[in-house]
Image (cartoon, rainbow, N blue to C red):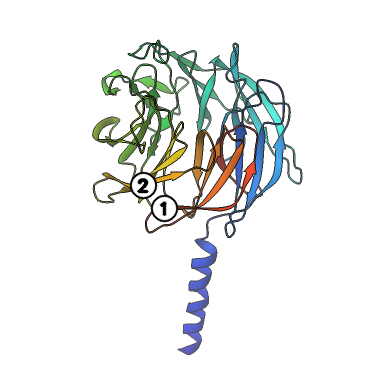
Amino acid sequence: MEKKAILFLIFFCWYRIGFNQIPSLDLLVGTYTNGVPDTGVFLFSFDTVSGNLEKKAWANQLVNPSFLTVHASSKVVYACTDTKLPSKGSLTGLELPKGTNQFRVLGKQGSEGENPVFVCSAEQWVFVANYNEGNIAAMEIRSDFTLNSYSQKIQLQGKSIHPKRQEKAHPHAIYLSRNNKYALVPDLGSDLIRVFEVNLHSSQPLKERSDLNHISPSGSGPRHMVFHPNGKWLYGIEELGGTVTFFSFKRGRLRPIQRLSTYSSILNEYSGADIHCTPDGKFLYCSNRIENSLAIFKIDTKRGDLSLVGHQKTNGEVPRNFTIHPSGKFLIVANQGSNSLVVFKLNPQNGKLTQVAEPMFVSRPSCLDWRSVGE
């Protein structure tokens, strides 16, 4: 019996420490390069004990690779490039050859619109939102992970009350539901969250469902969203309103339940940016430009409602983007205006944040994502 008990203990420890362990991850950073070819994508190793970042690899001769995503199976990086230019934007594929510190460009494809601001992928598809052009496009991934030209492009129509920011449709993101059956597109210009049915096996994977579109409050400017880990709740940050809305989500239909300010004080102008929740679904964070803060909310795990915990200064300027480590132990902010990445330790009991390590200098960081080590 004693031998069996020892063997069981060894197996249990192996299971808890080895099998269940979150794989080692590197931090990917997309940036603005002031509209000229430069080193614009960086890869950092991340120490999950100290919170230290160390530069590991980079990609040269890119123009404004300001948003990026990592394909789930291939680990190829797809970046929005040539953004915020008076010409059409593009998507660039990047891979990191084993044993090197420089990403290799797999190819470049037009995004079919001006200023691509968001890209996501699912199976053999990449989806992009072109903010200035007011359209979204779907591109098929070839067997070599380069992109075909667009298979589908959908021009959006609409406007709202802000004379400068809402003169036309401005899609700011594309989010796929957990089962990949729906795509949600927050349209800042039209104050709409547009809903599309998704069929990844069709040559035209997006089908507009205007009957499911959610009309946001006038002048709110929906920007980014995040699904709760349970897939049934959704939280959306509204850039112009400085607010966050909690929705229930079922069969493509959004039902607003709660709307709260993300700012600590009343301002004449707001600029909400990014939104994420912890992997355990207990806390939600929203980044506020102008105020340079993160709003911290506790999530009622039975109902999904939000209650404000407080605000944390990002210790930098213009927190355009941030990410939470899949362990739930760290949160990293990209302060675009002060050229810095700031790492915070996350308290899993109360959601509060404490800065660790010194800020890492990166010129105009604008997007963060995680990539498996060794891929």
Q: Quadrant of residue 260?
A: top left
Residues 250 and 292: in front is 292
Q: Position of residue 36 (x, y in %)?
A: 70, 21
* 292, above or below 349, in the image: above
Residue at 66 percent of width and 38 percent of height: 42
Q: Residues within 10 Å of mark 1 (few under 14, many from 20)?
A: some
Residues 315 and 16: in front is 315
Q: Amino acid at mark 2?
A: Gly
Residues 94 and 237: in front is 237
Q: Amino acid at mark 1?
A: Lys
* 226, above or below 229, in the image: above
Residue at 31 percent of width and 20 percent of height: 209
Q: CA distance from mark 1 to mark 2?
A: 8 Å
For mark 2, give the secondary structure.
Answer: strand
- Looking at the figure, which quarter contains the N terminus? bottom left
For mark 1, give the secondary structure.
Answer: loop
Q: Of the two numbered discs 1 and 2 on the same chain, state the one appearing first in sequence.
A: 2
**Residue annotated with mark 1:** 352
Q: Which residue in the rendered view is the most extreme toward the right?
A: 100
Q: Residues within 10 Å of mark 2 (few under 14, many from 20)?
A: some
Q: Quadrant of residue 81?
A: top right
Residue at 34 percent of width and 37 percent of height: 235
**Residue annotated with mark 2:** 310
Q: Which mark is residue 250?
A: none
Q: Position of residue 293 (x, y in %)?
A: 45, 40
Q: In this orientation, does residue 71 appear? A: no
Residues 206 and 212: in front is 212
Q: Which residue in the rendered view is the most extreme toward the bottom?
A: 2
* 53, above or below 201, in the image: below
Q: Do the CB atoms of the residues marked 1 and 2 lie less than 8 Å apart?
A: yes
Q: Position of residue 96 (x, y in %)?
A: 70, 39
Image mark count: 2
